[in-house]
Amino acid sequence: MSTFFTPGPAALFPTVEAHYAAAFRQNIGSISHRSGAFRKIYQHTDEQLRQLFALPKETAVLFTGSATEIWERAIMNSVEHESFHLVNGSFSKKFFDFSQELHKFAHAMHKPFGEGFDAAEVTVPEYAELICCTANETSSGVQMRAAEIHKIKKANKDKLVMVDMVSSAPYPNLDFNLVDSAMFSVQKAFGMPAGLGVWIANEKMLAKAERMKLHGETVGTYHSLPSLWENYKNFETPETPNVMGIYVLGKVAEDFNRIGVDVMRKETDRKAKALYDFAKKSDQFDIFVTNEPHRSATVVVLNCKQMAGDVIKQVQAKNDFILGAGYGKMKETQIRIANFPAVNLDQVEALIATLGSL
């Protein structure tokens, strides 16, 4: 069986198949999203994610079709005029592009591909309403540490801060008493099939959306923040959601809580260290992100001395390990290795041995 080290869709978490089997046995794919059975599923998933992320009571856990959708919904519901984006890769740039396409005045601080941000160098425009940070830039393997995001919020208390944690949740230890909103999708570090986005938002985000709506701004229809939140009060959704996905997410989050998020973070760090230590000594690979504090723990990007496509084919032929190619222009020169909870230290060490044998 193939072992996937791809950054998304990624390897399935080992318990996912059993959770889906249980869902089928319980006919969860056929229940109404207005039923008591669904409300119990939503409530359970909410409780498990609250525990996992240490969410304060002023936050809501909301569901959409994807994290990409949440970029759009967040801008529509919190930006009347101006947003500010930290852009250092393809996904942070898409978030910035969405704001422009929605006819907002989108400011950005740009860094070259492969470089990260520290709070001390960030100056937020005076009239920006939403500060958009990316905890892990999937395209380049750059992380923004939670402590730096917290500093930006503390220096800009009157502004909303949103964190894209798509390819790192639950690894970043974000303080949701500071951060106003975050989002992720389930097909990466949660090790599930794609098709579900999770939006964490606090009451300040809701108040802004309601104020915008009162002033005649368009904040969306069925997936506006006020609509999602109103339904959330009863553990319901505005439309028929991905019920199976919500059920399985709750079970996976329960698995994560049973392991312990701190234990998972330490294990992620151990695996990342093994990968980076290997690359430092290798004559076939180089670490792409040169600034060590900015190196992602969850998506390791390596430069290849030979064609990346050949590396990927050789690794698959030797041990049936599936690696991610570099993103965009880096496709033929880089590999991306997802270091998500679904792959354990033994599998990472086996991958390292395989890469070392090329």
Image (cartoon, grey):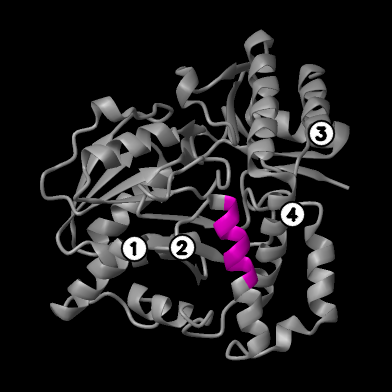
SS of the residue under disc 4: helix
Specify the amino acid type for callout 3: Gln
Q: Please identify the residue farthest to the front as the structure is shown.
A: 57
3D distance between C-alphas at marks 4 and 2: 20 Å
Kindly identify which numbered label has been placed on residue 105: none
Q: Are marks 4 and 3 in contact (CB under 8 Å)?
A: no
Which disc, if any, is residue 74? 1
Q: Which residues are magenta?
A: 44-52
Which residue is disc 4 drawn over? 255
Question: CB atoms at circles 4 and 2 under 8 Å apart?
Answer: no
Between discs 4 and 1, the one toward the N terminus: 1
What amino acid type should be assigned to the residue bearing mark 4? Asp
Which quadrant is the C terminus positioned in?
Answer: top right
Query: Predominant secondary structure in magenta?
Result: helix
Give the residue number, with chain letter if any, for mark 2. 199
User: Label 4 crowding class (10 Å Cα cut-off): few <14, some 14-19, many 20+?
Assistant: some
Q: Amino acid at mark 2?
A: Trp
Tell me which amino acid carries mark 1: Ala
Alpha carbon separation for disc pair 4 and 3: 20 Å
Going from N to C along the chain, the mark reached first, 1 or 3, is 1
Q: Residue at x 56, y 19 (%)?
A: 287
Total numbered badges shown on the rendered structure? 4
Using the image as rendered, state which of residue 313 and residue 92 is in the foreground: 92
Which residue is painted at 68% across and 85% down in the image? 37
Mark 2 or mark 3: whose residue is earlier in sequence: 2
Residue 280 seen in the figure: yes
Q: Nearer the viewer, residue 169 or 11?
A: 169
Q: Residue at x 61, y 38 (%)?
A: 325
Task: Give how far across and how far down residue 179 sits, in percent.
Answer: 37, 49
